[in-house]
Amino acid sequence: MGHPAGMDATFRTSFHSVRKVGVMVIRPKAFNPYEFVVVASLRAQQLLAGSVPRVEGDHNATTLAQMEVMEGRVSRTAAADAQGPHQTFWQL
């Protein structure tokens, strides 16, 4: 008794204790922080537009993009130097 809207303590405790644990991607010191954020955000936009992830995992687009940049699977290039098919109207 004493629980709002008829909720018992068991349900309330189990409901509030279930939460998704996120992944924290720590940027290596060698990366320029501004460039890391810009490249990761552009890659996240590509992932949201349907590009295939280059790392494994069940994470959201932002985390996958940060992981890809951190592992060196995505980097900034000049438009003239980009190789392969363009995945979107702009290319990383």
Image (tube, rainbow, N blue to C red):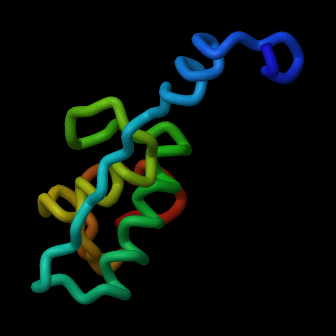
Q: Nearer the viewer, residue 86 or 36?
A: 36
Placement of the C terminus among the 4 image quadrants:
bottom left
User: Could you tell me residue 86's position as x and y percent?
Assistant: 40, 53
User: Viewed as shown, does residue 84 lie left or right of 22?
Assistant: left
78 lies above or below 46: below
Q: Nearer the viewer, residue 6 or 86?
A: 6
Q: Nearer the viewer, residue 41 or 3?
A: 3
Residue 54 sits in quarter: top left
Q: Residue at x 40, y 59 (%)?
A: 43
In the image, farthest residue toward the right: 5
User: Could you tell me residue 55's position as x and y percent?
Assistant: 21, 41
Placement of the N terminus among the 4 image quadrants:
top right
Q: Residue at x 58, y 29 (%)?
A: 16
79 lies above or below 90: below
User: Could you tell me residue 47's position as x and y percent?
Assistant: 45, 45
Q: Residue at x 55, y 44 (%)?
A: 49
Q: Nearer the viewer, residue 30 or 13?
A: 13
User: Viewed as shown, does residue 88 lie left or right of 76?
Assistant: right
Residue 75 sits in quarter: bottom left
User: Could you tell me residue 79's position as x and y percent?
Assistant: 36, 75
